[in-house]
Amino acid sequence: MKKIMIVGSAGAGKSTLARRLNEIIGIKLFHLDKLFWKPGWECISREELKEKIGSIITLDSWIIDGNYSSTMEMRLKEADTIIFLDFPLWLCLSGVIKRRFMYEGKTRPDITEGCKEKLDWEFIKWILTFPYKKRKTIHKKIKQYSEERNVFVFKNRKEVEEFISMVRKNSNV
């Protein structure tokens, strides 16, 4: 595992998993939210995001967490490991609510400084529609690369913990 891509709904724990993998195997970590958002929740253009990701994916190793469908194909082509946190809606919503209270009035470590944690209707709508609008597309895209890549689809946090244990064991940490 040298080029690891992590996708899934908001609240599933993509950034947490990415940080944990980074701590175990020491591969440089890139959070797409940190690349996309400027302070005050201003976004960069999709073209600028593609340029940033284009330079990252040429590196020898990386962990990239986040969805951003406009750049998913770029990452899929270069990743050797694809992880999809395909969690139930209720688990993702509870993750977002927990995160909201945990970081209230603060900036999370996986996002640009100056983007204080918030929970608004637009974001909730995105989470609510994820299983219907994004899930099937992600599965379809991942399937196209499944023969040449390590693909892990986790349905719950217990499966993620088992994976982390396996990675820790195999890396002798």
Image (cartoon, grey):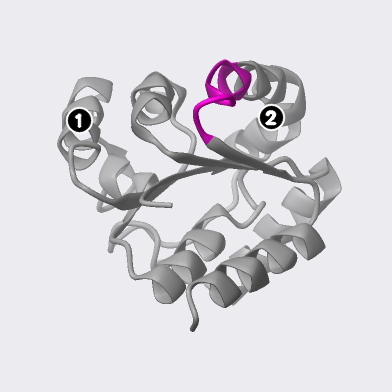
Q: Which of 27 and 157 is in front in this view?
A: 27
Q: How crowded is mark 1: few (under 14 residues within 10 Å), some or many (20 or more)?
A: some
Give the left or right position of residue 144, taking residue 52 as reference.
right
Sequence-wise, the earlier of marks 1 and 2 is 1
Where is residue 151? Give x, y as percent. Answer: 60, 38
The answer to whether residue 132 is above or below residue 167 is: above
For the image, the number of numbered tags is: 2
Is disc 1 in contact with disc 2, using a CB cutoff of under 8 Å?
Answer: no
Give the left or right position of residue 134, taking residue 155 as reference.
left
Residue that mark 1 sits on: 54
The answer to whether residue 103 is above or below residue 95 is: below
Is residue 170 highlighted in magenta? Answer: no
Where is residue 139? Give x, y as percent. Answer: 67, 23
Q: Could you tell me how far apart the alpha carbons at marks 1 and 2 are, in whole angstroms? A: 26 Å
Examine the rendering and report whether any part of residue 106 can be seen: no
Is residue 145 highlighted in magenta? Answer: yes
The answer to whether residue 86 is above or below residue 158 is: above
Badge 1 marks a residue whose secondary structure is helix
Q: What residue do we see at 59% from left, 34% from top?
A: 122
Q: What residue do we see at 73% from left, 40% from top?
A: 86
Give the left or right position of residue 40, taking residue 131 as reference.
left
Q: What residue do we see at 54% from left, 64% from top?
A: 16
* The quarter of the displayed image where residue 167 is located: bottom right
Residue that mark 2 sits on: 130
Badge 2 marks a residue whose secondary structure is helix
- Give the residue type that dot 1 points to: Gly
Examine the rendering and report whether any part of residue 95 can be seen: yes
The answer to whether residue 43 is above or below residue 129 is: below
- Give the residue type that dot 2 points to: Phe
Bounds of the magenta span? Answer: 141-149
